[in-house]
């Protein structure tokens, strides 16, 4: 679960600066290398893109891998955490001429001209469903048909035996992030319905840990 969004007016915005420097360690403590494997699963299969909008990439581990593979790609990385953006810039230093960063809410930004790739890895789970609907509708209205959306996130597997364990794990993550950052979201939103309503169509999906983790590619039509 990565940072970025503004909370509704009745909630204080979460502060992910508090966990930025331990985020990688905490991630490995939770699920080892599986979150990073989920993020990068489709990296080789991504068509060539020119301008990426990266929302809530945390310390930049995915973006550094993406820029290393796509020498003609530029990226705008958006996050509310100044510390996360500092770590991201440091990690992406070999490609820094192709990176811009912006400390802002994803709900308030305008994609750069020519944006043809959106990336949200373990970020949409920090949004409420209304926020997610707003985000997908805004981006769809400001990008061209053919734009790809690459996302990774948690899910409750359909297997009735696994569902209680997955639900407990996800509840524990939300509880930890509430204590550490002030995040007030308490359950997973539904990115699939929001993306479909915004005009995107899913073109690929892969699951890890029997469906607890998944990554998808969507295309705007």
Image: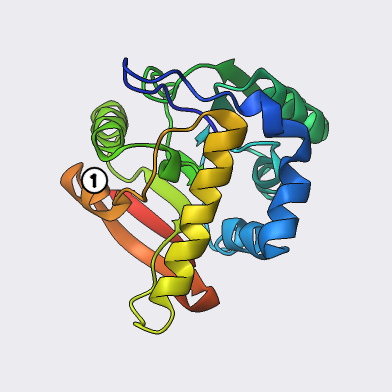
14 over 154 or under it: above or below: above
**Residue lying at 72% horizontally and 63% vertically, measured from the top left:** 32
How many numbered marks does the figure carry?
A: 1
Q: Is residue 216 visible?
A: yes
Front in this rendered view, residue 7 or 82: 7
54 over 85 or under it: above or below: below
Q: Is residue 26 left or right of residue 193?
A: right
Residue 145, quarter of the rendered image = top left
Q: Which residue is mark 1?
A: 194
Q: Is residue 71 left or right of residue 191?
A: right
Front in this rendered view, residue 97 or 158: 158
- Residue 189 rendering spot, x and y as whole percentages: 32, 48
- Residue 204 rendering spot, x and y as whole percentages: 39, 66
41 over 221 or under it: above or below: below
**Residue lying at 47% horizontally and 20% vertically, measured from the top left:** 13
Q: Is residue 121 visible?
A: no
């Amino acid at each position: 679960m990565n940072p970025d969004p503004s909370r509704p007016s009745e909630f204080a915005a979460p502060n992910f600066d508090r966990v930025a420097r331990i985020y990688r360690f905490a991630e490995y403590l939770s699920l080892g290398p599986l979150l990073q494997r989920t993020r990068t699963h489709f990296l080789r299969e991504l068509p060539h893109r020119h301008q990426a909008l990266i929302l809530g990439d945390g310390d930049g581990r995915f973006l550094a891998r993406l820029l290393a593979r796509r020498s003609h790609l530029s990226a705008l990385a958006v996050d509310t955490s100044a510390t996360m953006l500092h770590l991201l810039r440091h990690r992406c230093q070999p490609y820094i001429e192709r990176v811009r960063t912006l400390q802002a809410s994803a709900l308030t930004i305008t994609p750069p001209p020519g944006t043809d790739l959106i990336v949200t890895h373990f970020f949409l789970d920090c949004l409420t469903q209304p926020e997610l609907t707003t985000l997908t509708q805004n981006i769809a209205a400001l990008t061209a048909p053919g734009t790809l959306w690459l996302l990774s996130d948690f899910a409750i597997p359909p297997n009735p035996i696994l569902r209680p364990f997955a639900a407990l794990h996800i509840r524990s993550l939300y509880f930890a992030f509430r204590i550490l950052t002030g995040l007030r979201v308490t359950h997973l939103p539904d990115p699939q319905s929001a993306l479909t309503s915004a005009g995107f169509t899913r073109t690929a999906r892969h699951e890890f840990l029997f469906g607890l983790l998944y990554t998808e590619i969507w295309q705007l039509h």
